[in-house]
Image (spheres, helix red, strand yellow):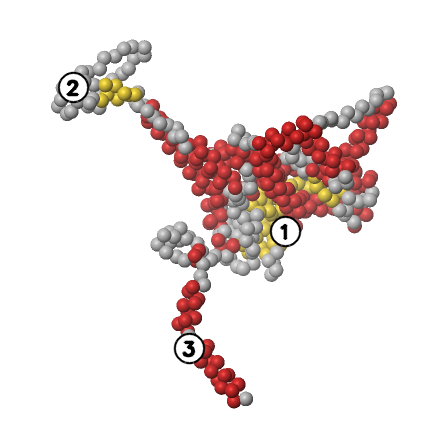
Amino acid sequence: MSQALSKASTMPLQLDTPRKALHRRRLLARYDSAETNENNRRHWAHADGLSADAAAGPDVRRTLRNRARYEVANNSYARGIVMTLANDTIGTGPRLQLLSDDPALNDEVETAFEEWAQAVDLAHKLRTLRMARAQDGEAFAVLASNPGVPHEVTLDFQPLEADRIASPWRFTPDDNEIDGVILDRFGNPIAYRVLKYHPGSARFSFSDDHVLVPARAMIHVFRQDRPGQHRGIPEITPALPLFAQLRRFTLAVLSAAEAAADFAGILYTDAPANGEADAIEPLDLIELERNMLMTMPGGWKMSQVDPKQPATTYAEFKKEILNEIARCLNMPFNIAAGNSSGYNYASGRLDHQTYFKSIRVDQDFMAARILDPIFLTWVREYALISRNAELLRNIPLRQWFWDGFEHVDPAKEANAQETRLKNFTTTLAHEYAKAGRDWEVELKQRAKEKNLMRELGLSEVEVMPVTSPKADQKDVEEESDE
């Protein structure tokens, strides 16, 4: 017992005495990236601990939006990248498929929704929203009644620029509002302040001239990079300095080439100063005539200027910087540059697989955040107009189809598809969905074609592609060589 007490009495001494030793051990357990020295001080000068909303404050977002819009409007590569991203994501527009047990109801609602989507130009507006997310950082759209819609359902889908969703300048900020986005105590948006006029328009005035739009009538989509973030920044923000560098380098190469082209040649002499060469006026200009011989002053020679422009590294610089620019959008170089000359079949297909996966993730995000809210609002109005109480009570499940991506080698993909169907590792619904088509619609169309062929006395000849093992082996060897 006495020994235990003696050991216990010595324990505080063991914890209190080695403070300097513990301090030294803490210094040894460190991260190199947390070290600040003269070599990295300037690089990390702007690193801060601001919250997500504070870091993306109104002034910061306004500056980034303006610069991104300027770059997209004046830089051909930036414009093409943003437009390509919108076209690949939206395509010709999404298509609705209901999953209820009533085929007649499914056909009726799907047809009506497709007609309404054409009436409000839904696909074009979705492409506009996708471009806005890339260059503005966020996209807004209001669901409101519009008597001008040429459809029995007068619901309209009206995009808004992010500048119009803002807190008035006389508004005192509080914790429940983030630059026009009003939140409840759980952090959910409940309403949006929409300025009646764009801040950049001539009619805008610095007053509380705005309207409150409930959250159920507002579509707000952005890429949430940080928890607690309520407003978005342009998706091309990391690439903005690179776009500027690309334009500067191109202009520098062009200016150097023009400066070199301004001089056809120079006169020089090997004779020493005040030597035997004839005296000429320094920096004098001599006009050269085409197809003529010219004599030089005694002791002087003529040499043509070697412009050395464009630089041999110009093409490589453009390739590397475009590759870095497109990386923040998960876009491969050949799509961003519109040039696949340096690609082979294998590398092109591999890059496209990564890009298409990113597109599918984005399509799923847009279906959940844009298309589902639109459909739920639309179907309620449609049910009231058609007096379908059952549809109003039980809105059926649904899925959305997007345009499919064409395979690099259609013949090989068709053979692989046939194999998957034979060994039951896929279904017709899945294969048609990858092509962006509804399997029920396609099979009904196929049945109509077969019935019409029988009525006309035409025989359906199914010719299966015949491929030899040698040919297949040759294709594999060619791909491996590439």
Residue at the image point whose x is 86% and y is 20% from the top:
457
Where is 414 relative to 174, above or below? above
| Amino acid beneath label 2 | Ala
Q: Earlier in the sequence, mark 3 or mark 1?
A: 3
Labels 1 and 2 touching (C-beta < 8 A): no
Q: Where on the picture, by quarter, is residue 96?
A: top right
- How far from the left and from the top, in percent, is residue 364? 65, 44
| Amino acid beneath label 3 | Thr
Residue at the image point whose x is 60% and y is 61% from the top:
185
Image quarter (top left, top right, bottom left or bottom right) of the C terminus: top right
Residue at the image point whose x is 20% and y is 22% from the top:
269
Where is 322 relative to 463, above or below? below
Q: Nearer the viewer, mark 3 or mark 1?
A: 3
Q: Is residue 362 left or right of residue 57?
A: right
Residue at the image point whose x is 15% and y is 24% from the top:
272
Q: Is residue 313 left or right of residue 264?
A: right
- How far from the left and from the top, in percent, is residue 370? 65, 45
Q: Secondary structure at mark 3?
A: loop
> Which residue is at the front of the view, 200 or 131?
131
Image quarter (top left, top right, bottom left or bottom right) of the N terminus: bottom right
Q: Nearer the viewer, mark 1 or mark 2?
A: 2
Binning the other alpha carbons within 10 Å of mark 1 as few (below 14), some (14 to 19) or many (20 upward) gives some
- How far from the left and from the top, in percent, is residue 164? 54, 45
- How far from the left and from the top, in percent, is residue 481? 57, 31
Q: Residue under circle 1?
A: 215
Q: Residue under circle 3?
A: 17
| Amino acid beneath label 1 | Ala
Q: Secondary structure at mark 1?
A: helix
Q: Where on the picture, by quarter, is residue 85?
A: top right
Labels 3 and 1 touching (C-beta < 8 A): no
> Which residue is at the front of the view, 377 or 334?
334
Where is 423 relative to 168, above or below? above
